[in-house]
Amino acid sequence: MDFDRYMLSTEEQLALYQALLFPRLFEERMLILLKQGKLGKWFSGIGQEAVAVGATLAMKESEYILPMHRNLGVFTSRNIDLVRLLDQFQGKASGFIKGRDRSFHFGSQELKIVGMISHLGPQLAVANGIALGHKLDGDEKCVLVFTGEGGTSEGDFHESVNVAAVWDLPVIFIIENNGYALSTPTDEQYRCVNLSDKGIGYGVEAIQIDGNNVLEVYTTIKEKAIEIRNNPRPIIIECNTFRMRGHEEASGTKYIQPEVFEPWKMKDPLLSYESYLVDSEIIEQGEIDRLYTKFKHEIEAAINESFGSPIEPIDPDSEIEDMYFPHQPEIVNPVTESTTERRYLDAISDALRTAMKKYDKLIMMGQDIGHYGGAFKVTEGFVDEFGAHRIRNTPLCESAIIGSGLGLSVGGYKSVIEMQFADFATMGFNQIINNLAKSHYRWGQNADVVIRMPTGAGSGAGPFHSQSNEAWFMKTPGLKVVYPAFPHDAKGLLLSAINDPNPVIYFEHKYLYRSLHQEIPDAYYTTPIGKANTIREGSHLCIITYGLGVHWALDYLKSQPELSIMLVDLRSILPWDKEAVEAAVRKTGRALILHEDTLVAGVGAEIAAHISEHCFEYLDAPVMRCASLDTAVPMNKGLERNFLAKSRLPETIEKLLAY
């Protein structure tokens, strides 16, 4: 390798050597601990340390880095507390994430490191969000994010690079091309000659460098970082290197021919650089020996301290509490009595406009939400009022935009993301379920993100624009899920959701957009998340519902004035108001749960189970559910009416009353 052409000072070259040596010695010691059964798993970075070390030292300490599980050098180059890191590897509460995830699946705001999740690709979008925050703040900073050659096959890579290109975000995408994604070689991953060639398709500058030459990695990234701080734009840097050990130690390397290792052994990033420094008389062997001894002593001392202290007892209460960022919402009543009759859709727009004025660091993102005003015109006129930098029209890339929302939150921003239809949330499902929902539990980082979900049937839109998928998200700890039935609640719940620092999935029924009117306050106010609204008292039975189901129930009750039926509008699905439901069951003795979603594993199943478990002695009849058919949503109007729960509501009520 050519080290001579890099014009670095002696001090810089020695600093790079020490930064390379330390993680190698640390990892060699970890491999011994692994064999002794003292560590559960290890992903080796031996042979590719130059990428992590060179990249980290090229960045400012105030700039975020998003590493992967083979990037020990990122953490050690940021002077991480070794004892705490070892506690982390053991799953101790004194580690970085209280024993909740393994390896390098953690982050640290102090170190400006955002940890990966096992799905690899989602962190690229998070880097975009952090970079967007820098750009909006006018900070001359860039963000560096790692992926592997295998990760470039994931949709998140393509979405994230494309968004970064379109928005000119200051992100350095590092591709560690180490030859194998677990056991799959590069010739089974892609057909382009070099991964850097992918940059052409996105209009992104992309270069290829020797990932085993620490001087080339350091100087290249440092130069590019300076460029994009002053002139924000993304860049792809493919670092060619090799994974000398298995994907993780248990997998081994039998799938790699032995002769493949030989040339890479000659290019060992530590030993080859060490030889260069000795041959160039920059360092003497005696100093090398001293550093080996010094570092081994430091590592051993940290091991003794970490493994010498017991693993703390678990705290089950904190497990529940830490799924969410602590938040005590203040219920705000409007300061004036001024009201305006607004449609359901207008109430949502009013809430968004009010929040945009209240929070300077609130960003809205979504397809066609700019000058077009969104698919349903909820954001019409917003660009003129708040500017395109805050009302951000996005490419068709749900995953990248949801991930960017988390990245914005890392930088102290709030975001509201519009799914054009709730059905399309499947394209960003991983980001919602595994990144947003688990972020605070995993490393204490809240996800201050609201995802608006236009939902529901009734307009003949068919299987892909009509689904009621709220139950998917009710199952996920870490999320909050709300579903207003009236314009007043639509505004109040949306403002509560935006105020909440946790991720909130906000369902809004398309059928109600223009068909429902209500007088609502003009001023700012909030409706509490997790509190139901008892719309009507009664004694014969209670109907527990939400969304469009509330209006189905009201229509039925108007046609049957002789019946004394209590109507409970949940308004929130996660958390849902157990006290209100239990009170209704105790009073009436009969419970019907009504929802537009299909029957099996719907929201009603969970509520019915809770009633049976906690209110059994008050029941005079079985808990019944009225839901839509267990089919996809049909387009034909007649079939759609037959599909919807509304068509079976009268007979279900009659059956329950007759029991």
Image: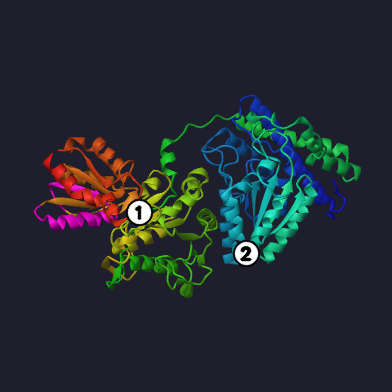
Q: Position of residue 281 (x, y in %)?
A: 91, 44
Q: Disc 2 residue type?
A: Asp
* Front-lying residue, 193 or 373: 193
Q: Position of residue 503 (x, y in %)?
A: 44, 52
Residue 168: assigned label: 2
Residue at the far bottom in the pictured view: 384
In which quadrant will I find the C terminus? top left
Scheme by which the image is coloured: rainbow
Nearer the viewer's eye, disc 1 or disc 2?
2
Q: Residues within 10 Å of mark 1 (few under 14, many from 20)?
A: many
Dot placed on the residue nearer the N-terminal end, 1 or 2 = 2
Using the numbered discs, state the Cα–Cα distance from disc 1 to disc 2 in whole angstroms.
34 Å
Which quadrant of the figure has residue 220? bottom right
Q: Which mark is residue 24?
A: none
Q: Residue furthest left?
A: 562
Please tell me whether residue 298 is drawn above or below residue 144 in the rendered image. Answer: above
**Which of the 4 image quarters holds residue 293?**
top right
Q: Residue at x 50, y 55 (%)?
A: 398
- Residue type at tag 1: Val
Q: Which residues are magenta?
A: 537-562
| Quadrant position of the N terminus in the picture | top right
Residue under numbered circle 1? 482
Q: Tags 1 and 2 in contact by the CB under 8 Å rule?
A: no
Is residue 548 one of those drawn in magenta? yes
**Residue 418 shows up from this direction:** yes
